[in-house]
Image (tube, helix red, strand yellow):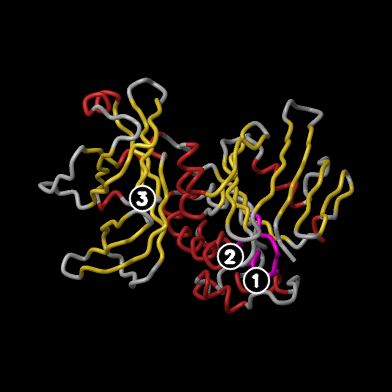
Amino acid sequence: MSDAIHTAFSLQFADSDFSLEVDLELPRRGVTAIFGRSGSGKTTLLRCIAGLQRCATGELRFGNDYWQRGRQSVPCHRRPIAYVFQEASLFPHLNVEQNLRYALRRAARGGPTLNEVMELLALQPLFARRPEQLSGGERQRVAIARALLIAPRLLLMDEPLSGLDAARKAEILPFLERLCAQAEIPILYVSHSVDEVCRLADHLVVMDSGRVLDQGPLEDMLINRHLSSDGDNDVSAVLRAKLAEVDSRWQLARLVFAGGSLWVRSNGEVAGSELRLRIRAQDISISLSAHRDSSILNILPCTIAAISDEPGGAMQLLQLSVGDSQLLARLTRRSVHHLGLHVGMAVYAQLKSVAIIR
């Protein structure tokens, strides 16, 4: 049975001007990020899928099973889902182990074992602690483990990192990356953070004012929509690469992608490791020739595919074709004019190794 998710909702609120109207067919595996600014309808959409939004009308089909038709809706507790909220909401009178064993009592057959989830999220050192003895990141790890243990067919995550400071986000993101890479069920991940979307998502849905503006594979959406949430520095491209070799003398690794290769600092990964690279538009400069008398290691031949103006008038955004891959570069209008840059022109993209995020 396919686990593709089809949603078609029309939702009106009598006490406000907000309405939600979506018609989506979402992938059966991988992470779909629901992205948009606050108030765009992301959480409301998730609540409709979970069966928590009672006034919703429309159709919701998961695989061959209808969870909603018109106003007839399968109750939330009968939908094979798990929901991770912004707050962990653990039972305060139970320790970590007891919270997790409570979830096991509700588990469907064929789900992960307690040991498997413990290993995935590194929970063993936390087992005897009560929720008040955990950091925010640790509480969210336990909440995610509890969700996985009930063996859902669909995992919903509603901005699970929004209540954490930068240090706690850095603590939990590697665990989320591991979860997303290993999950065999679809995950819907609500966020307004471009950084989280770039690190975790495979598919992207962009929402605004209760409507879906666009959707598609992450790499295509980043290039076509020039996503930004926390500031201009967010505008990025994502490359999927494989580690080809390690230069032990200089502690560098060469990563190959569909269009070339990049040298980055070695982090101890072994040859063949697959990596996701985020490259911000502000970190790419353009030259007309391949300079070799420079400290920059990564100089990629490319073609200018598009040039667009940015708000304010001083900057322009270049879309670059690097073989079968796409990058973005932000330049001043003065630089574009000075170099005589135009669509179809062959140029070189220059990128510092330290600027590549992975």
Q: Amino acid at mark 3?
A: Gly
Q: Which badge, 1 or 2, is on the more N-terminal residue?
A: 1
- Distance CA(mark 1)–CA(mark 2): 8 Å
Q: Amino acid at mark 2?
A: Val
Residue 16 location, quadrant = top right
Q: Which residue is mark 2?
A: 142
Q: Which residue is mark 1?
A: 100
Residue 55 belongs to magenta span: no
238 and 84: which is toward the camera = 238
Residue 147 belongs to magenta span: yes
Mark in the foreground, 2 or 3: 3
Question: Residue 243, image x and y in percent?
Answer: 34, 66
Residue range in magenta is: 143-156
Residue 228 visible? no
Residue 323 has which mark? 3
Q: Amino acid at mark 1?
A: Leu
